[in-house]
Image (spheres, grey):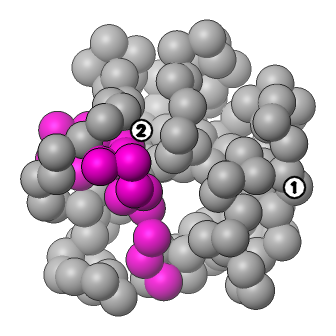
Amino acid sequence: MKLITCVEDRFGLLYNRRRVSRDRGVTEKISALLSGGVLWVDPYSAELFSPMITPRMDEKFLEMATKEDYCFLENRDIRPYVSRVDELILFRWNRRYPYDLAFPFEECFGNWNLVSREDFPGNSHDPITLEVYHP
């Protein structure tokens, strides 16, 4: 699967029980990345994509996605599913927030190769950095 997530500078996913991932510019980038592919999400995340993208929703989305599918993660621990990830698409907020849940980047993806990086203006702030990693 191709894993998509949004993090603050210390890899926080949620801060003060709120999502880091809300930005229209990011949603537009994800829509372009999908190129007609399937996006799986937790029901918690579905509202981020309406009406631009109609994702498939399921509590077990990380188990249900195929190798070709995309999964958007914002409120789960990826550790049990790392072996299923073939590509990591990371949106960096370039901000620090007091996070509640962190993405285990160093532990799980620290030895992966950065294959592309792009800064772009977000709707909420400038810049947001898109990074793509491969094993």
Gap in angstroms between the C-alphas marked 1 and 2: 24 Å
Q: Is residue 74 left or right of residue 102?
A: right
Residue placed farthest to the left in the image? Answer: 96
Region rendered in magenta: 7-24
Q: Is residue 64 above or below residue 70?
A: above
Q: Is residue 53 above or below residue 13?
A: below
Point out which mark residue 133 bears. 2
Label 2: how many residues lie within 10 Å, few (<14), some (14-19) or many (20+)?
Answer: many
Name the image quarter holding the N terminus. Answer: top right
Point out which mark residue 92 bears. none
Please say whether residue 79 is visible from this viewpoint: yes
Q: Is residue 30 above or below residue 68?
A: below
Residue 85, image x, y percentages: 62, 26
Q: Nearer the viewer, mark 1 or mark 2?
A: 1
Residue 114, image x, y percentages: 32, 39
19 inside magenta stretch: yes
- Residue 35: which quarter of the image? bottom right
The residue located at (76%, 52%) in the rendering is 43
The residue located at (52%, 14%) in the rendering is 79
- Residue 58: which quarter of the image? top right
For label 1, the residue is 56
Front-most of residues 40 and 131: 40
Front-most of residues 123 and 119: 123
Amino acid type of the residue tagged 1 in the rendering: Arg
Front-most of residues 13 and 121: 13
Please say whether residue 116 is visible from this viewpoint: no
109 inside magenta stretch: no
The residue located at (55%, 31%) in the rendering is 76
